[in-house]
Amino acid sequence: MTTAHATPPGAALPEHPDALWRDAEPQRSYDVVIVGGGGHGLATAHYLAKLGITDVAVVEKGWLAGGNMARNTTLIRSNYLWDESAGIYEHALRLWEGLEEDLGYPILFSQRGVLNLAHTEQDVRDSVRRVEANKLNGIDAEWLDPDEVAKVCPIVNVSADIRYPVQGATFQPRAGIAKHDYVAWGFARRASDAGIDIIQDCEVTGFVTDGDRVTGVRTTRGDIGCGTVALCAAGHTSVLLDMLGVPAPLQSHPLQALVSELLEPVHPTIVMSNAVHVYVSQAHKGELVMGAGVDSYNGYAQRGAFHIIERQMAAAVELFPVFARAHLLRSWAGVVDVTPDASPIVGRTPYDNVFLNCGWGTGGFKATPGIGWAFADTVAHGRPHPLIAPFGLDRFVTGALVDEHGAAAVAH
């Protein structure tokens, strides 16, 4: 086992990194086997423990939270258009607001708000519609004109003489950021303290089936017997489903981001622009964190096309002229599963005891506590929790899609 995260200030240092987790030889049976040791898998384990279910193993092919959890841009918001999306993301945001106390661990949750810029008349109409839909769902949302945008974030260029002039923006004041590795460690510590085994360097290579049930999980460290399987492997769930012979409408794409050198605090909020495919916040240490839309091609590589980064930087400099002299520190890519309607797939599979959580696209991190809570309830009771019932695999047969393509100001 290895770990690649720094312990936050004030947290007790273990004698050895492995002492943080209850390690175990995987050649035994568990009531629940969670595949994927990222944010969703660890959150699911934590909330299963709260329900009294602790005979659980979390298996991770690499190191703890070393996949998309380590590569996201830490944005948290709930201002999605459709009722179904608003429900799960708003539930998650409310959990975020009390998560540090729940975990007994610092996660540096900073509610600095998010601006979603509108650059055309159609952007304005769509954005105002989303604000009104948010209000009907009890979500804090406002429409700001360009002058009001400049008051919230003075470094945004609201001049009418730029390529994509800012005609206004939606604003969600409760949105924010959190420290992603601290979040992972907080969930992992609580799950481990409850007696749940977290097994790293343990890649799933297949499944043992008996009719419509899975009785075992084959791994590079041996076979694990299971009562229930919960799939939470972001970006690679389609590979696991292929092992089970379950088709799913998933495509894996690189999703790129970058950070600048450390700067003094200059950026007071989060700014997103779907039209120019860039969003920018400033991390706690001072880096500017910039994300882009997904690369158009399919792939599992954790790097993307250079032209995406080039366009991302050009858009950022136009919107924020003050960034023109900032230096790039590093760039990277995660791998995200994207569905036809840009909404996740959560719930049952054709196997009685296998449950699925995937397809979050760019929304995975912000949903972490909410989906962990609802998915744990689903696994514990053997049926989809009402919050995730609309996101079942069967919607692609019935046609009851939750079409968030562009509606929630994200660039899939």
Image (spheres, rainbow, N blue to C red):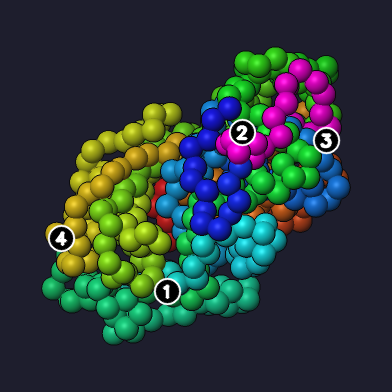
Q: Which residue is mark 4?
A: 324
Q: Earlier in the sequence, mark 2 or mark 4?
A: 2
Considering only order in the chain, which callout, 1 or 4, is on the residue closer to the N terminus?
Answer: 1
Q: Gap in Å between the C-alphas at discs 2 and 3?
A: 20 Å
Viewer-side label of 4, 1: 4
CA distance separating discs 3 and 1: 45 Å
In this view, the mark in front (2 or 3): 2
> Which of label 4 and label 3 is nearer to you?
3
170 or 321: which is nearer to us? Answer: 321
Q: Label 2 to label 1, Cα distance in Å?
A: 45 Å
Residue 48 lies in the magenta-colored region:
no
Q: Which mark is residue 170?
A: 1
Q: Residues within 10 Å of mark 4 (few under 14, many from 20)?
A: few
Between the C-alphas of marks 4 and 1, the distance is 25 Å
Please indicate whether residue 31 sits to the left or right of residue 164 in the image.
right
Q: Which mark is residue 18?
A: 2
Residue drawn 57% across the image and 36% down it: 17
- Is label 2 in contact with label 1 (beta carbons under 8 Å)? no
The kind of secondary structure element at disc 1 is strand
Q: Is residue 204 left or right of residue 164?
A: right
Please provide percent x and percent y for residue 261: 25, 53
17 is within the stretch colored magenta: yes
Secondary structure found at label 4: helix
Three-letter code, disc 2? Asp
Is the C-beta separation of discs 4 and 1 under 8 Å? no
Amino acid marked by disc 3: Asp
Q: Position of residue 229 (x, y in %)?
A: 75, 31
| Nearest to viewer (mark 3 / mark 1) | 3
C-alpha distance separating marks 2 and 4: 43 Å
The stretch of residues the image draws in magenta is 15-35
